[in-house]
Image (cartoon, helix red, strand yellow):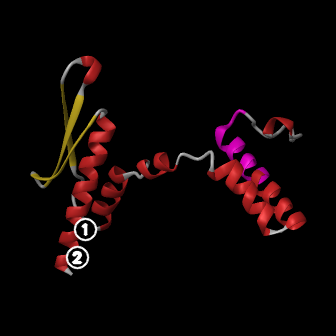
Amino acid sequence: LVSFLKVSESVDMNNTSTVTNISSSLLESIIGAIYIDGGLKPASRFVFEHIIKRTDILEIVNSFNYKGRLLEFCQRHGMKKPKFATSSHGPDHNKTFLCTITLNKKPIGTGEGKSKRNAEEGASKEALEKLQILVKEEN
C-alpha cells in the first residue's frame, strides 16, 4: 500500500525507518476506518485475517533478546559485563555451537545451538534465570 501513497519529495522513502513508520500509520488508519464504518466485529476480522493469520508467533517468541536482557540486568545491578566464550564442533555443513558465559570468572550459563547466536541466547537465558534468583535471595 505504501507504493500507492503520495508523499512529499522531502520524505526519504529509501529509509527503512521512515517506510516502517508510514506503513504502521497507514495500517492503523485503515483499521480505524473499518472500525468507525462497521464496528468492532469487521475491524477484528480484518486484523485476524490480515495480521494475526500471517504472523509467525513462534518467530516473535523466539526473538526475545536474552543476551541484551542479560547485559542490561548486569549493568542495572552494578555487576561486571559477562564474558561470552563460544566454540563449535562438527562438520562445516552441520556445526553445533556451544557458548559458556562467565561472570567474575565463574560460569553462570551454557547454551548449545545450530548457530552462534542460538547458543549465546540459550546461555544468556540460563544465566539470566540464575542471576535473577541470586538477586532475589540477596533482597
- The spot of residue 96 in percent (x, y) is 23, 30
- The spot of residue 112 in percent (x, y) is 22, 40
Q: Quadrant of residue 95?
A: top left
Relative to the observer, which residue lies in front, 91 or 116?
Answer: 91
Secondary structure of the residue carrying numbered label 1: helix
Q: Residue at x 26, y 59 (%)?
A: 128
The local crowd at label 1, few if under 14, some if 14 to 19, many if 20 or more residues have their Cα within 10 Å, is few
Name above or below for residue 105 compared with residue 136: above
Circles 1, 2 touching at the beta carbon (< 8 Å): yes
Name above or below for residue 81 compared with residue 87: below
> Label for residue 136?
2
Q: Residue furthest top?
A: 92
Distance from disc 1 to disc 2, alpha carbons, whole Å, reads 6 Å
Name above or below for residue 129 compared with residue 116: below
Quadrant of the rendering where the C terminus is positioned = bottom left
- Left or right position of 61 against 27: left
- Left or right position of 27 against 63: right
* Disc 1: which residue: 132
Q: Residue at x 41, y 52 (%)?
A: 64
Secondary structure of the residue carrying numbered label 2: helix
Q: Quadrant of residue 39?
A: bottom right
Q: Residue furthest left?
A: 106
